[in-house]
């Protein structure tokens, strides 16, 4: 049971932290804004679906990393092109409000703005685009992130913890299972519903090394599937009154579902949610032309692609 608790909590934590990073980066996530993700995490902590000692520090690291990354790419993009991106994403009003607050702001003002829902993420981008000193921004933003996380996770725990004491074991498993499935399905929908970005933003994403983008896409896709499977596992064990499940069987199940998910989504929509969002592909492309030139240079006769297979 402790092994499954760790697996369920680990995949849910991984998925939520990846989404928190993307939200801080400036990627608009319908159905899953930052505060909703943190409240959901608090509910999962309150129902013992994820351990607080695992989620809280990792979530803060994800928030800080996303915030600093957003600050950096906004500085490279510039204020004119950044507003063009906001217009394309139908977020120009929030961008303009953030710009009015952030320009000529002190570290104290940055901290306050970073805790205003609907404006906080754009405050990071505006601060970066307006060439605000990084020291001033970090001094205000990092403490604000800690307060923001504590408040919203605390709200979720305050709701989930009292209910946990009133539920039986079967009801606790069912409740946490439903929450995990909701987290997985909601995350998938949020990723798939991200509007197409401006060409400038897509170009900026494409300039990021492919390895980090591929890793983040894998985390998102694996996290979505594994979180849903973990929730279904809890509901099934609650309904069938099963206390112990084989570790090997559980991991094999997750692996099989991930494989089916990748095949189905790539054949249907053309790409998984992670691939589409981060402009990567899991399909390995072999540079046949380069291999042929190398063989020719070494004196070996070139071979056709069919013979290579």
Image (cartoon, rainbow, N blue to C red):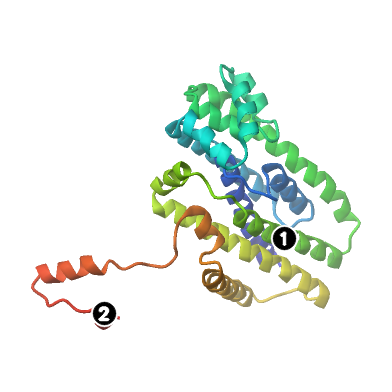
First in sequence, mark 2 or 1: give its number. Answer: 1
Which residue ends up furthest to the left in the rendered image?
299
Q: Alpha-carbon distance for marks 2 and 1?
A: 45 Å
Please state which of residues 71 and 45 is positioned toward the viewer in this rendering.
Answer: 71
The answer to whether residue 187 is left or right of residue 126 is right
For the C terminus, give its image quadrant.
bottom left
For the N terminus, give its image quadrant.
bottom right
Quadrant of the rendered structure where residue 150 is? top right
Q: Is residue 103 above or below residue 198?
A: above
Residue at 48% from the left image edge and 30% from the top image edge:
80
Residue at 75% from the left image edge and 68% from the top image edge:
234
Q: Position of residue 7 (x, y in %)?
A: 64, 63
- Mark linked to residue 203: none
The residue identified by callout 1 is 180
Residue 265 visible to an observer of this rendering: yes
What is the secondary structure assignment of the residue under circle 2? Answer: helix
Residue at 52% from the left image edge and 46% from the top image edge:
197
Residue 64 visible to an observer of this rendering: no
Please state which of residues 79 and 186 is positioned toward the viewer in this rendering.
Answer: 79
Which residue ends up furthest to the right in the rendered image?
166
Q: Residues within 10 Å of mark 1 (few under 14, many from 20)?
A: many
Please state which of residues 169 and 17 is positioned toward the viewer in this rendering.
Answer: 17
Q: Position of residue 36 (x, y in %)?
A: 72, 46
**Foreground disc of the pair 2, 1:** 2
Q: Is residue 185 above or below residue 122?
A: below
Q: Are marks 2 and 1 in contact (CB under 8 Å)?
A: no
The residue identified by callout 2 is 308
Q: Position of residue 180 (x, y in %)?
A: 72, 60
Q: Position of residue 27 (x, y in %)?
A: 57, 44
What is the secondary structure assignment of the residue under circle 1? Answer: helix
Q: Is residue 51 above or below residue 104?
A: below
- Count up the numbered dots: 2
């Amino acid at each position: 049971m402790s092994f499954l608790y760790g697996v369920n909590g680990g995949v849910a934590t991984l998925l939520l932290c990846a989404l928190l990073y993307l939200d801080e980066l400036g990627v608009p996530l319908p159905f899953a804004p930052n505060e909703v993700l943190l409240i959901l995490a608090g509910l999962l902590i309150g129902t013992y679906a994820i351990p607080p000692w695992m989620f809280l520090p990792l979530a803060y690291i994800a928030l800080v990393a996303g915030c600093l990354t957003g600050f950096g790419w906004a500085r490279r993009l510039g204020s004119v092109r950044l507003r063009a991106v906001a217009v394309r994403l139908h977020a120009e009003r929030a961008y303009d409000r953030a710009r009015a607050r952030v320009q000529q702001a002190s570290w104290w003002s940055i901290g306050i703005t970073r805790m205003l829902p609907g404006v906080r993420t754009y405050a990071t981008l505006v601060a970066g685009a307006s060439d605000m000193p990084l020291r001033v921004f970090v001094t205000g933003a990092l403490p604000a992130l800690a307060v923001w996380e504590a408040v919203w996770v605390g709200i979720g725990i305050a709701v989930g913890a009292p209910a946990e004491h009133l539920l039986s074991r079967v009801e606790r498993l069912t409740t946490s299972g439903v929450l995990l499935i909701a987290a997985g399905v909601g995350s998938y929908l949020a990723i798939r519903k991200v509007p197409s970005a401006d060409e400038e933003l897509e170009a900026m994403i494409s300039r990021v090394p492919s390895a980090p983008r591929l890793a983040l896409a894998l985390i998102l896709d694996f996290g979505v599937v594994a979180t849903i499977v973990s929730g279904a596992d809890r509901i099934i064990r609650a309904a069938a009154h099963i206390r112990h499940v084989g570790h090997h069987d559980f991991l094999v199940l997750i692996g099989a579902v991930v494989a089916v998910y990748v095949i189905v989504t790539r054949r249907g929509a053309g790409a998984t949610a992670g691939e589409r969002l981060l402009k990567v592909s899991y399909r390995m492309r072999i540079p046949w032309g380069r291999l042929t030139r190398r063989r020719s240079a070494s004196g070996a006769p070139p071979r056709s692609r069919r013979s290579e297979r």
